[in-house]
Image (tube, rainbow, N blue to C red):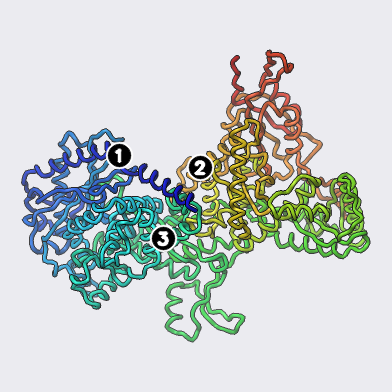
């Protein structure tokens, strides 16, 4: 434990060092800051009027004749914020310069009707004009203070040696002691046009906006003094900033920022904060204390005070009055300002949730969760189960509001949408988060607010559970509750209906009828309906990311999981009949399905084949059927017996005899159609095909004992070992799906992506299943995914970012591992890595995946993927994750769409083999017909007439039986073709293909593609790549459509 703690401290030290300013950078920033301050303080007095920012003054609706004034140079200009005490966090280097505006620039009643905000802006206009003439300034742009458009700030980019745009100086006006504070209490109205029914309303947000400027310097001094005395406080704040910035949905205008974090840290060092933080603590300890306080303290809602207890002039009534307007209270050093007046309740709940999740990471994960807490990006796309973008710029509801009343209209819309969706979704959601980043990137102050709000509103929804979130019926108030019924009907309109339920209760309800496989779309339908009804938004203005990737799992517009019920019925029938067989020497004791379809992990679960029934009938039968039928492995265990032979070959022969007898018995007793060979017996029943496999019970007991120690040795037949491992894997994954129903859709998308990018040769399906399982078992810093798109995005990021070289992936599905087990796994992993480092011929185990049945990672990744293949798929995953994130949060650029996530770039291969689509065994699985690759056409061929993927179904029962005899079970011409190529060219190139249904095979040259004539001869025979590819086409004659050379192999120099 001590060693792990030391490692964490070392990582934190390196992280702080990496993000903190170096001495040289600090010198550069200091020089730039001094230069700008000097320039600001030298600005001469001058008259300024509304024509300096006509659009801004106009949109504020400020009286133009009352905002003219004489600019006076600032009382002072000084550095504030994190830079003033060395807590700036790179990559963006920001330094705040507070510019105190003289009281002479204002009239005593300028707090009314936005006069102050107008003059504040005009004051900045004068500074901007003057700084533009300074040669040391590269660029100036306008921004907002904490996302508040009515309080602009200047971002000044000086000419420095630092990378362009990395350093910005933020010019923030302050107004110390300008107005009488009693005129700005929360209950006063200071915007006369803000009224309801002719009665003016309080303007608490407007008033707080002005008070904030009056005490900004005083509050900054308090924070600065707190941090100047302690290095560990500064380092803790840096860690908190890194933590918050990784969580983009809480590092926002309505939640937390660097300034508020510094205030919280400073507060907890004071007597008012209970001296929870001691300056003798380490940065790591302080970070943990702050996170715990954010996540578990209830004091926020009661009110936090920076003022010492004896200096407060606050009654309980004062606190309650503030709580009427603001959900969270953190009073500044003056006691007049709630520093969290912009924070919404939804944002605060999310902040607490993030802090609680971080606490769990600190307590449960290795290295105190360093990777999860500081290095993992928790953005909108990956955090929320459901994300939507709403285009509000043409909304009548938005346009009907003034730009600025008490609150800016963008904040009003955020709140309204949040309340509306929370009411509509009820307990389907745990959290609804609405963020409208309304500021334009290049704001021209002359335009006012006309271009604000052009960006869409971003909404994130955390779902409760699959059971709650995807239910079909919402039950409303009882028919007897008249007032509640009226409210319910007003909200839901024509969607509300009175229903009698099974328990006899008569109540209002809403019903969202859909197919079982479409239930994940219910959330989307509810959100669209609510927004259409209450915001009058058109459907094209709402983009909800829910089912955009479903096309990759659908066949003919329908998800084949809809046949899962029939599949399970067919298996149950087979299982019962096998156990009822009494004419075989040993009875069947156990029947277990091994196919991914039975653990909800098959991309395309098989659908009933018309010729795989006991009785064939032309009724409701299609005119054609697939020639090939996939057969699903089923494990059988027989009763114990001491008469089994000991010789491995004899064991396999005995198994074959048993299987043949079982097949014959099933045919004779129940009329089930069976096809048999020495290797397997395939049983066709209820439209499905099952391949029976026997696990030898003596081998099973020995293997089970070995598995207890995580070591399955190879002393017994490999088939038994393989069956045992598959049995263990299937049981665990099936149990996992029972706990997390969303696992199935996520793993299906993950497999579709892996295979669509032609990695089928290198990744077993079980590897993908275990990686996805890890996401559900170790979801931190997220919640367990409740949507397929979010789970799939996290899978891509895990593939792209996991440090496979230094850490094993431990998948503990049933919480079986003890600390001793984990230590054993890590030691085995280290031993594996040392072997690779010390012996060039050692096995290249790039992905070390440990499970309870395979602690040494021998089952699925012992031979593949290699480090180079893993690096390649990580690169693909990173690219797909970036594209998917952009599609969710920003929409689709014209050239990249959702389909592109599954389109693999054929230019990444040295040669491409295209296959005839109508010769594929499952042509309906083809996602995109491959386009003609750019390169040299080496050869092409016509399709063979010997094999067709479909057979016609004609005539009566006898004719159908003849056709059934021609059905090919588990026949896959692609696999046979690849096997032939590997046999002949195994040392020349690698093959990449899609096992699900791709019509393209990628080829990459190996480094030793040339063949040596003899071991002792130095001369090499160089094989012409054109000749090689022609031979490839010849091997696949009738199956290969064309072969294209994109890049010739590089010739080695001697």
Image vertical order of residue 769 relative to residue 254, above or below: above
Quick one: label 3, few (<14), some, or many (20+) residues within 10 Å? Answer: many
Q: Which residue is mark 2?
A: 878
Q: Pointers 3 and 2 in contact (CB under 8 A)? A: no
Please state which of the two labelled residues, at mark 1 or mark 2, is closer to the viewer: 1
Nearer to me, 1036 or 1012:
1012
- Of the numbered discs 3 and 2, the one sitting upstream in the chain is 3
- Of the numbered discs 1 and 2, the one sitting upstream in the chain is 1
Nearer to me, 23 or 357:
23
Q: CA distance from mark 3 to mark 1?
A: 30 Å
Q: CA distance from mark 3 to mark 2?
A: 27 Å
* Residue 341 coordinates in the image, percent (x, y): 27, 64
Q: Which residue is mark 1?
A: 22
Q: Secondary structure at mark 2?
A: helix
* Residue 186 coordinates in the image, percent (x, y): 21, 70
Q: Which mark is residue 355?
A: 3
Q: Is residue 1001 visible?
A: yes
* Residue 38 coordinates in the image, percent (x, y): 13, 41
Residue ranking furthest to the bottom: 480
Residue ranking furthest to the front: 2
Q: Is residue 812 left or right of residue 146?
A: right
Residue at 36% x, 46% y is 16
């Amino acid at each position: 434990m001590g060693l792990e703690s030391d490692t964490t401290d070392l990582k934190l030290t390196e992280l702080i060092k990496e993000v903190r300013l170096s001495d040289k950078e600090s010198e550069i920033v200091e020089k730039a800051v001094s230069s700008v301050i000097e320039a600001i303080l030298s600005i001469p007095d001058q008259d300024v009027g509304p024509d300096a920012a006509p659009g801004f003054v106009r949109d504020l609706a400020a009286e133009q004749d009352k905002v003219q004034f004489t600019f006076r140079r600032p009382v002072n200009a000084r550095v504030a914020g994190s830079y003033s005490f060395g807590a700036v966090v790179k990559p963006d280097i920001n330094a705040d310069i507070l510019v105190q505006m003289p009281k002479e620039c204002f009239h005593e009643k300028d707090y009314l009707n936005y006069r102050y905000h107008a003059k504040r802006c005009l004051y900045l206009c004068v500074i901007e004009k003057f700084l533009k003439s300074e040669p040391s300034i590269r660029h100036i742009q306008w921004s907002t203070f904490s996302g508040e458009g009515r309080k602009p700030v200047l971002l000044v980019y000086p000419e420095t040696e630092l990378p362009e745009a990395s350093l910005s100086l933020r010019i923030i006006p302050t107004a110390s002691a300008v107005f009488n504070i009693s005129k700005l209490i929360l209950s006063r109205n200071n915007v006369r046009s803000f009224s309801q029914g002719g009665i003016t309303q309080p303007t608490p947000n407007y008033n707080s906006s002005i008070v904030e400027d009056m005490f900004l310097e005083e509050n900054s001094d308090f924070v600065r003094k707190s941090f100047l005395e302690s290095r560990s406080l500064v380092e803790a704040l840096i860690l908190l900033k890194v933590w918050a910035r990784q969580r983009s949905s809480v590092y926002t205008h309505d939640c937390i920022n660097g300034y508020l974090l510094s205030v919280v840290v400073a507060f907890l060092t004071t007597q008012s904060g209970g001296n929870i933080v001691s300056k003798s603590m380490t940065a790591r300890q302080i970070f943990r204390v702050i996170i715990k306080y954010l996540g578990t303290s209830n004091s926020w809602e009661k009110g936090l005070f920076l003022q010492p207890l004896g200096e407060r002039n606050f009654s309980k009534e004062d606190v309650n009055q503030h709580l009427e307007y603001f959900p969270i209270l953190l009073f500044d050093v003056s006691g007049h300002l709630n520093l969290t007046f912009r924070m919404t309740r939804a944002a605060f709940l999310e902040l607490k949730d993030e802090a609680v999740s971080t606490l769990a990471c600190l307590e449960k994960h290795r290295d105190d969760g360093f990777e999860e807490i500081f290095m993992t990006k928790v953005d909108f796309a990956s955090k929320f189960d459901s994300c939507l973008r709403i285009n509000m710029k043409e909304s009548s509801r938005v346009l009907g509001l003034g730009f600025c009343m008490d609150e800016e209209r963008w904040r009003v819309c955020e709140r309204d949408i949040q309340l509306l969706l929370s009411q509509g979704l009820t307990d389907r959601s745990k959290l609804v988060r609405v963020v409208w980043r309304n500021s334009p990137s290049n704001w021209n102050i002359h335009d006012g607010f006309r271009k604000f709000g052009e960006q869409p509103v971003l909404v994130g929804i955390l779902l409760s559970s699959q059971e709650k979130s995807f239910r079909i019926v919402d039950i409303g108030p009882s028919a007897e509750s008249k007032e509640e019924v009226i409210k319910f009907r007003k909200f839901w309109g024509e969607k509300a209906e009175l229903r009698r339920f099974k328990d006899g209760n008569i109540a209002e309800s809403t019903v969202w009828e859909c197919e079982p496989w479409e239930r994940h779309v219910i959330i989307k339908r509810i959100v669209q309906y609510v927004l259409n009804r209450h915001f009058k938004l058109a459907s094209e203005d709402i983009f909800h990311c829910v089912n955009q990737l479903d096309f990759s799992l659908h066949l003919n517009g329908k998800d084949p999981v809809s046949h899962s019920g029939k599949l399970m019925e067919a298996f149950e029938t087979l299982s019962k009949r096998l156990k009822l067989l009494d004419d075989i020497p040993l009875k069947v004791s156990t029947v277990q399905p091994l196919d991914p379809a039975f653990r909800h992990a098959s991309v395309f679960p098989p659908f009933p084949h018309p010729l795989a029934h006991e009785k064939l009938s032309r009724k409701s039968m299609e005119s054609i059927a697939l020639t090939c039928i996939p057969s699903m492995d089923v494990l059988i265990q027989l009763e114990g017996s001491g008469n089994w032979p000991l010789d491995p070959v004899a064991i396999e022969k005995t198994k074959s005899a048993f299987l043949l007898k079982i097949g014959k018995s099933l045919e004779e007793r129940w009329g089930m159609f069976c096809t048999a060979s020495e290797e397997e017996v395939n049983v066709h029943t209820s439209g499905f095909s099952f391949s029976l496999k026997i696990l030898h019970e003596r081998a099973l007991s020995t293997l089970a004992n070995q598995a207890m120690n995580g070591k399955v040795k190879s002393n017994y037949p490999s088939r038994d070992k393989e069956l045992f491992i598959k049995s263990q894997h299937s049981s665990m994954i099936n149990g996992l799906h029972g706990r997390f129903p969303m696992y199935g859709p996520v793993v299906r998308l993950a497999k579709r992506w892996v295979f669509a990018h032609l990695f089928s040769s290198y990744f077993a399906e079980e590897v993908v299943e275990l990686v996805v399982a890890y996401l559900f078992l170790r979801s931190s810093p997220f919640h367990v995914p409740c949507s397929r798109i979010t789970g799939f995005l996290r899978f891509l990021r895990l593939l792209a970012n996991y440090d496979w070289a230094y850490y094993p992936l431990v998948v503990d599905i049933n919480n079986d591992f003890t600390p001793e087990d984990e230590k054993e796994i890590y030691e085995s992993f280290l031993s594996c890595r040392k072997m690779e480092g010390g012996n060039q011929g050692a096995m290249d185990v790039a992905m070390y995946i440990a499970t309870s049945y395979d602690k040494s990672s021998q089952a699925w990744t012992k031979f593949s993927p290699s480090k180079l293949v893993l690096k390649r798929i990580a690169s693909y995953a990173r690219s797909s994750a970036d594209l998917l994130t952009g599609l969710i949060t920003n929409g689709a650029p014209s050239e990249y769409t959702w389909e592109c996530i599954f389109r693999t770039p054929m230019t990444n291969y040295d040669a491409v083999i295209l296959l005839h689509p109508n010769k594929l065994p499952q042509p309906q699985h083809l996602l995109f017909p491959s386009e003609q690759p750019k390169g040299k056409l080496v050869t092409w061929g016509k399709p063979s007439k010997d094999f067709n993927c479909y057979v016609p179904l004609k005539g009566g029962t006898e004719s159908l039986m003849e056709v059934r005899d021609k059905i090919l079970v588990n026949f896959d011409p692609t696999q046979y073709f690849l096997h032939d190529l590997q046999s002949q060219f195994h040392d020349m190139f690698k093959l990449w293909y899609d096992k699900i249904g791709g019509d393209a095979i990628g080829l990459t040259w190996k480094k030793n593609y040339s063949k040596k004539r003899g071991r002792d001869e130095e001369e090499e025979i160089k094989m012409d790549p054109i000749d090689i590819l022609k031979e490839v086409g010849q091997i696949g004659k009738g199956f290969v459509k064309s072969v294209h050379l994109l890049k010739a192999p590089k010739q080695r120099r001697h």
